[in-house]
Image (cartoon, rainbow, N blue to C red):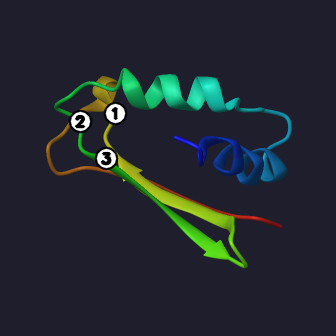
Amino acid sequence: PEDYLDICAVINAIYPEYPETPEEYRHQDETRDAKMKWARYVAIESGRICGVGGYSQHSGMYHPQKFHMDIYVAP
């Protein structure tokens, strides 16, 4: 839970026109449909999160063998 601030900082540095807040990001995780598979990974350098990646499925386009991937690296 304490990582949401740093995760959002990486994403917002890349897409400042679509800012994410830690509260919104956490809410998305906590209310995700239980049948949707997902995982998130962070890369850490010098004790700080410098990258975020993961995969997920979307309920509006659900297929048991199709996934969406995101990879963000701090500029």
Compared to 62, does 13 lie above or below? Answer: below
> Viewed as shown, does residue 12 lie left or right of 64?
right
Examine the image and state in which quarter residue 16 appears.
top right
Q: Give the numbered dot on residue 36.
A: 2
Please name the residue shown 83% across and 67% down the image: 75
Q: Which residue is mark 3?
A: 38
Nearest to N terminus: mark 3 or mark 1: 3
Where disc 3 sits, the SS reads strand
Please name the residue shown 65% across and 32% down the image: 22
Compared to 60, does 44 lie above or below? Answer: below
Marks 1 and 2: in contact by CB < 8 Å? yes
| Amino acid at circle 2 | Met
- Residue 60, x across and y down, in percent: 32, 23
Q: Which residue is mark 1?
A: 58
| Mark 3 and mark 1: Cα distance apart in space | 10 Å
| Amino acid at circle 3 | Trp
> Viewed as shown, does residue 65 lie left or right of 1?
left
Q: Give the numbered dot on residue 11.
A: none
Nearest to N terminus: mark 2 or mark 1: 2
Foreground: disc 3 or disc 1? 3
Where disc 1 sits, the SS reads loop
- Mark 1 packing: few (<14 Cα in 10 Å), some, or many (20+)? some
Please name the residue shown 16% across and 51% down the image: 65
